[in-house]
Image (cartoon, rainbow, N blue to C red):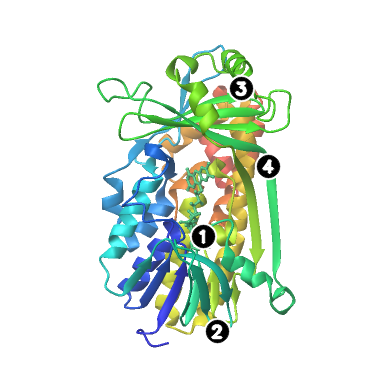
Amino acid sequence: MKKEEKIIIVGAGLCGTLLAVRLAQRGFKVALYEKRWDMRKKQIDAGRSINLALSNRGLMALESAGLKEKVMDNCIPMRGRMIHPLGKKPFLSPYSGRPEDYINSVSRPGLNMTLLDAAEGYENIEMKFDADVVDIDLKSASIQYQDAQGTMHTDEGQLIIGTDGAGSVVRRSMMKYTSELLFNYSQDFLRHGYKELSILPTSEGGWQLEKEVLHIWPRGDFMVIALPNLDGSFTLTMFHPYDTEIGFNKLDTKEKIAEFFETYYPTLLPYIPHLQEEYAENPVGNLGTIKCYPWQAFGKGLLMGDAAHAIVPFYGQGMNSSLEDVRVFDEILEQQGTNWDKVFTLFQDARKKNTDAIADLAIDNFYEMRDYVDDMAFIRKRKLEMQLEQEFPDYYSKYSLVTFRPELSYDQAMRRGRLQDKLLLSLCKNENIEELPLQEVYNQVRKIEI
Ligand SMILES: Cc1cc2nc3c(=O)[nH]c(=O)nc-3n(C[C@H](O)[C@H](O)[C@H](O)COP(=O)(O)OP(=O)(O)OC[C@H]3O[C@@H](n4cnc5c(N)ncnc54)[C@H](O)[C@@H]3O)c2cc1C
């Protein structure tokens, strides 16, 4: 492919915009299509702040495009989880025993706008907003899209890359060739959904709760989490079942909502005086895992990010893995040049088992965050992991392997992490674990081979 020939990217979210920047930096001509309006010109949801946990894998990908520092300027570090058990005092569970290991709260629209601004700076990127791609011919790499007035247009490139999220239209176009491509697809919804609420800033613009942590109110089958925003507010997310006696489907009157929060989240309630209005206004979103394979078709079309592998948000890795896709793709492109069929095949081979691994880990963490963060054996294990990380610099817990070691693949992190967890949890069932010398625990962990 000559560099003046065009790559069409469908979806100017986090993954697609970073990909456009990286391809433009390599000299390719890119057409970036986005069905929504340009968020830099029109604010979404009347100032509602949605944030995400950005960690080392996402940062490494941003660094490869020279954007890490710019993004970090607008992040708030989160050094651990502040657990708020029902009826007991809150306590901090650090993410790692190393002070340099922390995750970051970043505004989703803020990050997307930083990436769009960066893309704007490249003459070889053409951005089209209000352009809803409705049909794709993969074999000719052409698209049909509808503008804001409802008029249909067509465009054609050399390649089409679908970064159009969990409901991907590019993925749907691959399904037209199910038997030719041997296309596999699965979608697993949790019986839980999510709803966003918020804690407002103090009158001085400060934070009403401790700022540099991720707060969790675990309640067995459900929980609320809170991430800090730069303006002093916190975005709360209720992860909650649909169907149970106190599920979303049953919390249908102001009285029931008030009673539910008084019973399960009494210490949170004083911070959310506007609960009823937000509860009524904000929608409930679904949570699910999407897996598919192959991700490429005919050396012409490719899926990346959530379009290829949407996961539940409980490891804080969906965006991070989508940004990591761009870094890995870019490295393969560097090695292979523009033999696209080969680049696409190597990319999907490199990524598939890793995105499957993080999908499974995210489901595991759903149960861990809900059910175990205030369980005694689990608390002893976290304490032991902290001590190991402080004492032995080459020890990384499963969470640290996944979150802070981007040079390891998700699959490697998962396999080592699970074996470590099994060993440590069996030791921590014993209440007197503190009597066991740390060196002995470390020696046992060191013997683990993957
Ligand atoms: C409640 C929740 C919390 C989360 N928290 C975290 C977290 O803390 N950390 C983390 O790493 N991840 C988190 N995630 C996951 C993260 O949001 C996704 O993994 C990430 O947004 C994927 O990026 P993407 O660019 O692949 O897709 P998206 O962000 O979905 O972007 C897709 C883009 O394509 C556009 N588009 C779609 N269809 C079309 C079309 N037909 N034509 C043109 N454009 C189209 C969309 O408008 C959008 O702009 C969370 C997810 C949820 C639901």
Residue 449 visible somewhere in the drawing = no
Residue 195 point in image, percent of width and height: 55, 34
- Disc 1 to disc 4, how far (Cα)? 20 Å
The residue located at (73%, 28%) in the rendering is 244
CA–CA distance in space, label 2 to label 1: 23 Å
Determine whether 336 is above or below 232 in the image: below
What is the residue that sits farthest to the bottom in this orientation? 2
Given contact means CB atoms under 8 Å apart, are the residues at marks 2 and 3 in contact? no
Circle nearer the N terminus (1, 4): 4
Nearer the camera: disc 2 or disc 1: 2
| Horizontal side, residue 272 vs residue 259: left or right | left
Q: CA distance from mark 2 to mark 3?
A: 59 Å
Q: Which residue is mark 1?
A: 305
Which dot marks residue 376?
3
Q: Which mark is residue 140?
A: 2
Going from N to C along the chain, the mark reached first, 3 or 4, is 4
Q: Do labels 4 and 2 touch, CB within 8 Å?
A: no
Q: Secondary structure at mark 3?
A: helix
Amino acid marked by disc 4: Leu
Residue at figure coordinates x 69%, y 54% from the top left = 187
Image quadrant where one finds the C terminus: bottom right
